[in-house]
Every structure is written in structure tokens, then in C-alpha cells.
């Protein structure tokens, strides 16, 4: 069951980071000009990816371990929701990322700003997936806990 708690913590870290990007960092960077916006987005994206990508995998693995020891199917559901961030990023967000990464800050324009606004909408799905994973883990843990109490 300890793996289930660790999966929940990992999902919370993932979700908190995704939420922060969408609701704090993004509005702040939109307050600057197009060139500075793109120049800030590029390294921020790289660092965010380096942090969130492993969290999704670690959370999934911990969820599988929790399922293995408890049989709680909600652990698997939560793990799959966390892992779903990978295909979403690759197929849903990556085309926009590639255009933004290929654009030099000196070439920034209202079009690149619009792409960063679009990127944030796409990125918000990551927050939703993280929240759903956390909810699944909470249900799994409460179900396991109720079973232990009986």
C-alpha cells in the first residue's frame, strides 16, 4: 500500500507542476513582448518536460506496484491516466512545440504568441489528467483502507 501513497504523491507533484505552468507562469510570460515571451518559453518548456516526464513514468510504475500488491484496479486507472500524458504530449502538444522551438526569438511575432496561447490550452489537458489520476489514487487508497478496517 505504501506504493499507492507514493503514486498519489507523485501524481500530486505532477499535477501541481502542470497547474503552476498554466495558471501562474503562462499569464506572467504573456505580459511581456513577443520576443521575450518566446525566449522565456523555450527553456521553461525544456525544464518542465525534464521534470514532468519522469514523474508520469514513476507514478505509473508505482501505481502498477500498488495494484500488484493490493489488486486495486483504481491504481491501474490512475497510473494509465498519468502515463496518458506521454502520448498526449507526443501527438497533441509536440507539433506546436516543434514550431515554437524552431522559431528564433528574433523571429517572434503575434503568430508565435498565438501558438504559445494554444500550447497552454493543450498543456492544460496535462493538469486534468493529473487531477483525474490523483482522484483515482484517492479512491483506490480509500477502498483499500476500508477493506483493511472491516
Image (cartoon, grey):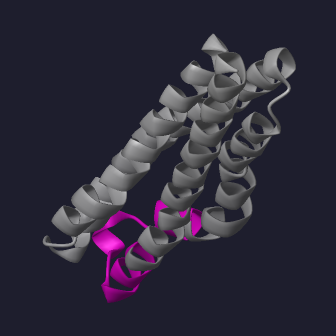
In the displayed image of the protein, which residue is found farthest to the bottom? 110
Question: In the depicted view, which residue is nearer to us: 112 or 55?
Answer: 55
* Residue 108 sits inside the magenta stretch: yes
| Whether residue 102 can be seen here | no
* Residue 54 % position (x, y): 60, 30
* Residue 111 % position (x, y): 40, 86
Give the residue drawn at x 39%, y 84%. Answer: 114
| Whether residue 77 can be seen here | yes
* Residue 74 % position (x, y): 75, 41
Question: In the depicted view, which residue is nearer to us: 50 or 69?
Answer: 69
- Quarter that holds the N terminus: top right
Q: Vertical placement of 32 versus 41: above or below? A: below
User: Is 87 displayed left or right of 38 in the figure?
Assistant: right
* Residue 111 sits inside the magenta stretch: yes
- Quarter that holds the C terminus: top right
Give the residue drawn at x 82%, y 14%. Answer: 69
Amino acid at each position: 500500500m505504501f506504493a499507492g501513497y507514493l503514486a498519489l504523491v507523485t501524481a500530486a507533484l505532477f499535477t501541481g507542476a502542470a497547474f503552476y505552468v498554466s495558471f501562474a507562469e503562462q499569464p506572467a510570460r504573456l505580459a511581456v513582448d513577443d520576443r521575450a515571451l518566446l525566449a522565456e518559453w523555450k527553456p521553461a518548456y525544456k525544464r518542465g518536460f525534464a521534470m514532468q516526464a519522469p514523474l508520469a513514468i514513476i507514478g505509473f510504475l508505482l501505481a502498477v506496484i500498488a495494484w500488484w500488491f493490493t489488486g486495486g484496479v483504481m491504481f491501474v486507472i490512475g497510473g494509465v491516466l498519468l502515463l496518458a500524458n506521454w502520448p498526449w504530449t507526443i501527438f497533441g502538444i509536440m507539433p506546436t512545440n516543434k514550431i515554437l522551438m524552431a522559431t528564433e526569438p528574433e523571429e517572434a511575432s503575434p503568430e508565435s504568441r498565438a501558438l504559445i496561447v494554444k500550447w497552454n490550452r493543450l498543456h492544460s489537458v496535462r493538469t486534468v489528467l493529473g487531477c483525474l489520476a490523483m482522484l483515482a489514487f484517492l479512491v483506490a487508497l480509500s477502498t483499500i483502507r476500508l477493506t483493511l478496517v472491516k
